Image (cartoon, rainbow, N blue to C red):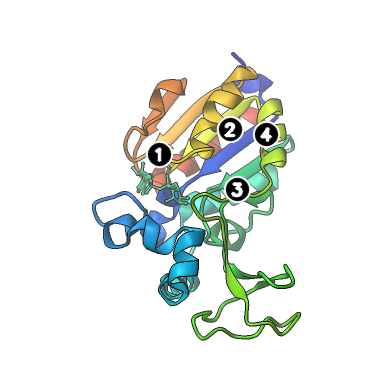
Amino acid sequence: MRHMAQIRNIVVLTGAGISAESGLRTFRAADGLWEDHRVEDVATPEAFRRDPDLVQRFYDERRENILAARPNPAHEALARLDREWSGDLLIVTQNIDDLHERAGASRVLHMHGEGLSAWCTACDARQRWTGILRDEPPCPACGARALRPDIVWFGEMPYRMDDIFAALSRADLFVSIGTSGAVYPAAGFVQEAKSHGARALELNLERSQGSQWFDETRLGPASDLVPRWVEEVLGGAS
Ligand code: APR
């Protein structure tokens, strides 16, 4: 097991919990998104074929919420780490919001896609999108009315898995923030990192489904735990 002084390469995995204090609903809490919507109705390719208007409305509303949200101290602390950490750092987020980037982080990878991006299924172009899609606007690149949310739905392959596994294989420290560990492949990253000798830390409001795999679990709100952890890492680094 590597100690703080030996930590050079860090992989941080974030989930909906890191954006909860920015007013964005999580998925599996009592007031979570999956309480009001069936995954099968709004988050699968089959659902989109069956009822595209229902799916577009779901993501149009999420896009509005993302635009209205602001980064919180947890996002800001990770952006500080990104600025000041001289070793490798990759923030792998399951979130489709852009709060990491709006806080100033750049070493961010959206494995489940981005809410502020539209993907044309006719010409494969992707572009920043802040408006609605339910009115089937033409693709700015090819003119086809074939835009869908640039989101990885259940049953689809997450983005840039090779880059993620390469970073996990080099990681000295794996940190999971605000995720329930309910969804694979993200839920398996802790074991992957540990199989390469990394130390694993969990920062979450409650124990996740994969807590047993972590060397340490700290419970509490991300806006409190993450700034303190980043201070520790950067303090330990100087
Ligand atoms: N601070 C820290 N953790 C929090 C906070 C908070 N303020 N609020 C909630 N949490 C924790 C919860 O305890 C829970 O463990 O965040 C986790 C959120 O879990 P989920 O709602 O399951 O969200 P997530 O793990 O990101 O879901 C994974 O599932 O639905 C799909 O594609 C979707 O990316 C998503 C994936």
Under circle 1, the secondary element is: loop
- Looking at the image, is mark 2 or mark 1 earlier in the sequence? 1
Under circle 4, the secondary element is: helix
- List the residue tagged with mark 3: 158
Instruction: Name the residue nearer the viewer: 118 or 109.
Output: 118
Tag 2 and tag 1, C-beta contact below 8 Å: no
What type is the residue that disc 3 sits on?
A: Pro
Tag 1 and tag 3, C-beta contact below 8 Å: no
- List the residue tagged with mark 2: 233
- Pick the quarter of the image with the C terminus: top right
- List the residue tagged with mark 1: 182
Under circle 2, the secondary element is: helix
- Looking at the image, is mark 1 or mark 4 earlier in the sequence? 4
What type is the residue that disc 1 sits on?
A: Ala
* Image spot of residue 105 (x, y percent): 64, 54
Q: Which mark is residue 165?
A: 4
- Looking at the image, is mark 2 or mark 3 earlier in the sequence? 3
Determine the CA span between mark 2 and mark 3. Answer: 29 Å
- Looking at the image, is mark 4 or mark 3 earlier in the sequence? 3
Question: Looking at mark 1, is its residue's CB closer than 8 Å to ligand 1?
Answer: yes
